[in-house]
Amino acid sequence: MSTFQVAVGDTLETRSFAADSVQLFLYNAAIWNPHRIHYDLPYTRETEGHPQLLIDGPLQGDWLTQMVEEWLGTHGVLTAFAYSNRMAAYLGDVLTGAGQVTECEGQSATLSLTLNNQNNQTTTVATARVRFQARP
C-alpha cells in the first residue's frame, strides 16, 4: 500500500481566481443571497459606497476549498474548514490562493491558506484539516 506523503512546510500549487459579473450573479442566486452589492453596480456605488461589485466572502472560501480538494485528489478527504474574510475583494481583482501544510499527525494534516489580491493584500485566510487514505 502506498500513502500520500506530506510534511510540514509543503505547499499547495498557487492558483489565481478572477470572478466576472455573471459568476457573481449566479453564485448569489445559488446560495439565495439577495444582497445587491454582488450584482447591482449603481446600488453598490451610490448606496453602499463601494467602487465595484464585491466578490462574496463565501465564494472566496469555496475557492480555497477547491484548492485543497485539487491538492488531495483521491488521497484523502477534507474534514474541517474555517475561513475569515479580512478585507473586501472587488470585481476586477485577481485573487491568488496559496496554502501550506502547518501540522502533520498520523494520517491527518492541517493546512493554512490565503487569498491575496493583485496588490499582495490578504483578503481571506483559512485553515483546513484533511485526513489521508491509504491506496493499494
Image: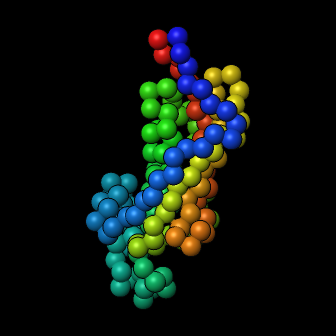
Q: Position of residue 15 (x, y in %)?
A: 47, 53
Picture residue at 41% right of the left edge, 73% below the top: 92
Residue 117 appears in the rendering:
yes
Image side of residue 105 versus residue 84, left or right: right
From the viewer's perspective, is residue 78 above or below residue 43? above
| Most foreground residue, 74 or 123 | 74
| Most foreground residue, 47 or 123 | 123
| Quadrant of res 45 | bottom left
Picture residue at 45% right of the left edge, 39% below the top: 70
| Most foreground residue, 118 or 122 | 118
Image side of residue 31 versus residue 8, left or right: left
Q: Position of residue 78 (x, y in %)?
A: 53, 34
Q: How many marks?
A: 0
From the viewer's perspective, is residue 27 above or below residue 79? below
Residue 61 appears in the rendering:
no
Q: Position of residue 98 (x, y in %)?
A: 56, 52
Picture residue at 52% right of the left edge, 55% below the top: 97
| Most foreground residue, 26 or 3 | 3
| Quadrant of res 12 | top right
